[in-house]
Image (tube, rainbow, N blue to C red):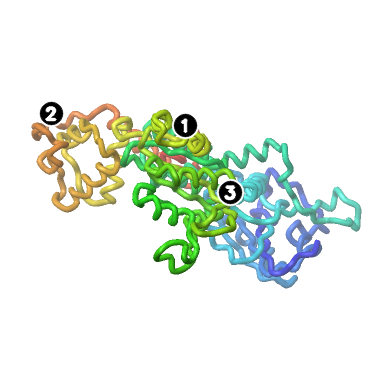
Amino acid sequence: MPLDPPRLLLTWSDRGLGRPLPHHRPRDAADLGPVIRLLEHAGPYAEVWILTVPDGAEAAGVLAAEVRERGPRAEVVVVPIRDPSDHAALFGALPPVLDALPPLAVDVLLSAGTPQAQTTWVLLVQAEILRARMLQVVPPAFVPDPHPLPVREVRLDFAGFPEIRALRAEVGRLRAEARVAGDLVGESAPMVALRARIARVAAADVPVLVHGETGTGKELVARAIHEASARGKGPYVAENCAAFEEGVLTSELFGHERGAFTGAAGRRRGLFEQAHGGTLLLDEVGEMPPRVQVMLLRVLQEGAVRRVGGERPVKVDVRVIAATHRDLAAMVRAGTFREDLWYRLRGATLEAPPLRERPGDLERLVATFLGGRPLTPTPSAWAALRAWRWPGNVRELRAEVLRWTVFCDGTVRIADLAPEIRGDAVEQPESIAQIEPLAAAVARAERRAIAAALAAWPDNLSAAARALGIDRHTLARKR
C-alpha cells in the first residue's frame, strides 16, 4: 500500500505486558506481529509512536528498537492508565497524546492493543477528534502466502450503518457536555436538560434560536454549541444586532465594496464571510430592522451574500445561531418580525433558564465567580441571596460577587449585600443562622461522596461510579 511521505504511524504495542492477557492468543514464532508486518508492507513512515501502559514499557522499548532497524524514528509513549481495557480511562488519557502529535498525516493501526483500545481509535476517528486513516493488518493465519493485500484500510463511512452513527452521536454528546461544564455552571434540573439539548443540537448542522432573559448566558450557550460541533475548529463570530443603525448593521453583516457609500474607502468582508466554515451568533436578533431581516432571509435561503454595492454573490458556509430575550412569536403576530425568517431561524430552539428557576446552582455560581478568593457569606447573607429573584440573572449575580471582592474581607454579611438584595433583613444570631436548606446540605454531601470515590479510584472512573451507584457518564459530568 503506497503512502505519500511524510506520515506518522500511531499504534499500541503488540508485545503485551510480559504476562498472558485474556484477549491474546499465543503467537506463532515466525509471526513478527502486526506492527512490523505493517512496516514491511506499507510505508515509508517518518515516525512511529508506540503507545503502552506503564507495565508494558520494557516490551514496547524492544519493539521500538526493531522499528528503528527498519528506518523510521520510533518513540514509546507511556499512557498513565493501569487498565487498557477500560474505555473511560482510555478516552480520558488519549487527548493529551493527540494534542502532542506533530504536523504529519496520521495512520492508526487497529490490529494492536486491547479490543477496547482498538475500538477507542475507531470512536476518535469517526467522531473526527483524530483525523487519521485506519489500517488493519490481515493475520497470516487467515490468508494465503503471499497475500496480495496484507494491509487494508478500514472505512466505516458508508450510509445506513446505525452503530457508527450512534457512536458519533454519543461522542458528540460527551464532547458537548465536557465543553460546557466549565462555562455553563450548575447541576440543577434545568441546566442538566440544557446541556443534554446542547449536545443534540451541536451534532446537527441546523440554525439555532436561543431564547432567554437578559443575563442568562445565551452567548455561552451559543459558544458551547459551536465548540462541540463539527465546526468547532472554524471561526466563531458574534455580533449584537441592537448595537448598530440599519445601514451600519447591513455593512457589518454582509460587507461592502469600495465606493458603495460615503466613507467606503475599500472593500470590506462582512461577518458572514469572516465566519465562513464556522458559526455566526446574531445576538438580540429581535432588534434587527425589517430591511436587514429580508437580506438575512435571502442569505439563509441561498447560502450566499451580496456585499453592499456588489454585483456578484459570494458563497458562504455558516451556521447561524440567533439569540434574543424577546417573544419572537408575539412579534410575528404584531408584524414586527418576519414570519418566514422566524421559521428559518428556529431550526432548533433552546431556552436559557433564568436564575430564579435554578436556586440550587447559586452556591456553585458564587464559588465560580469568587475564583478561589477566601470570601464566605454568612448564613443570613445566604438566606437573603436565595430569597432574591435576580432579575438580571447570572450577570447580576456575577456583578454582586465581584463587588464583594473589592469591599469584603473574609466574611460577606447582610450589610455587605446590595440594598435591593438585603432589603430589611438583618444578621441572625448564630444558632438560628446555622440552619441550612436541605438542598444545600444534600449538594454538599454529594460533593463529599464523589470526592471520596475519585480519591479511592483515581484512574478508574467506572469503578468509582459503581461504588457510588450511578452511571459513569453522570459521574463524569458531576466530577
Q: Amino acid at mark 1?
A: Ile
Note whether residue 473 is visible. Answer: no
Query: Which tag is nearer the camera, tag 1 or tag 3?
Result: 3
Q: Where does the image place residue 304, in percent across and percent down from the top left?
A: 57, 51
Dot 2 falls on a residue whose secondary structure is: helix
> Residue 140: horizontal and vertical position, in percent?
84, 53
Within 10 Å of the Cα at label 1, are there few (<14), some (14-19), or many (20+) other Cα atoms?
A: few
CB contact under 8 Å: marks 2 and 3: no
Q: Amino acid at mark 3?
A: Gly
Residue 387 visible: yes
Q: Earlier in the sequence, mark 2 or mark 3?
A: 3
- Left or right placement of residue 19 versus residue 292 in this view: right
Tell me which label, 1 or 3, sits earlier in the chain: 3
The residue wearing badge 3 is 303
Q: Which mark is residue 222?
A: none
Q: Residue at x 68, y 66 (%)?
A: 7
Q: Is residue 366 above or below residue 256?
A: above
Residues tagged 1 and 2 counted as in contact (Cβ below 8 A)? no
| Quarter of the C terminus within the rendering | top left
Q: Is residue 262 above or below residue 381?
A: below
Q: In the rendering, which numbered label is found on residue 470?
A: 1
Q: CA distance from mark 1 to mark 3?
A: 45 Å
Q: Residue at left 20%, top 35%?
A: 385
Query: Looking at the image, is mark 2 or mark 3 nearer the viewer?
Result: 3
Residue 9 or residue 58, whichever sits in front = 9
